[in-house]
């Protein structure tokens, strides 16, 4: 007598992966790596002095302190790169953030995408 064939396993259910909540990811990152008031002031001053935007400010705030401070202290390099590559300071600093920690760049860009989607949704209403 032969054993009944084993029925095939059903395929796994489709992934119910929810979109990444970049705000939540950034908040958790900031809690894990809080910045000092002194570092925050240095970042704020750097952003104002160089006419950078809130995305750069957020990116610098999400980096580990030493990495953020290294970027803040590299104003002459940023100025030279801006002239050399004909890019804005925002582009240069975002590239430096990405080199320092690609996950921070991904968070900032994810938040920018969410904000752009919200703006687009309001425009359609």
Image: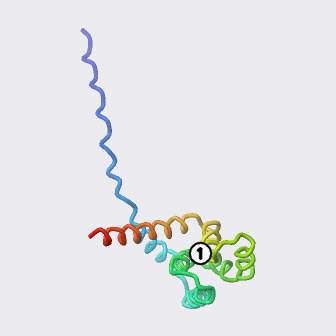
Measured from the top left, where is residue 2 in percent x and y? 26, 11
Residue at point 61%, 79% (across, down): 65
Q: Is residue 70 left or right of residue 23?
A: right
Instruction: Say which of 93 and 36 sits in front.
Output: 93
The residue that mark 1 highlights is 64
Measured from the top left, where is residue 57 in percent x and y? 54, 80
**How was this image coloured?**
rainbow
Residue at point 72%, 80% (across, down): 79
Q: Quadrant of residue 42?
A: bottom right
Taking 5 as reference, is 65 above or below it?
below
Q: Which quadrant is home to the N terminus?
A: top left
Taking 117 as reference, is 5 above or below it?
above
Residue at point 63%, 68% (across, down): 95
Measured from the top left, where is residue 96 in percent x and y? 65, 71
Measured from the top left, where is residue 40 in percent x and y? 55, 87
Outermost top residue: 1
Number of residue marks: 1
Residue at point 35%, 70% (across, down): 118
Instruction: Say which of 4 and 16 sits in front.
Output: 16
Q: Which quadrant is home to the C terminus?
A: bottom left
Q: Is residue 119 left or right of residue 63?
A: left
Q: Residues within 10 Å of mark 1 (few under 14, many from 20)?
A: some
**SS at circle 1:** loop
């Amino acid at each position: 007598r032969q054993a009944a064939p084993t029925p095939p396993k059903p395929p796994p259910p489709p992934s119910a992966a929810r979109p990444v909540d970049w705000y939540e990811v950034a908040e958790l990152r900031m809690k894990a790596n809080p910045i000092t008031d002194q570092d925050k002031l240095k970042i704020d001053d750097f952003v104002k002095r160089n006419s950078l935007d809130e995305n750069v400010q957020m990116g610098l705030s999400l980096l580990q302190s030493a990495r953020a401070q290294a970027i803040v202290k590299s104003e002459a390099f940023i100025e030279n790169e801006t002239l050399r590559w004909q890019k804005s300071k925002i582009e240069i600093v975002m590239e430096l953030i990405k080199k320092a920690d690609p996950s921070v760049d991904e968070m900032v860009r994810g938040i920018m995408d969410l904000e752009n989607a919200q703006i687009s949704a309001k425009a359609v209403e």
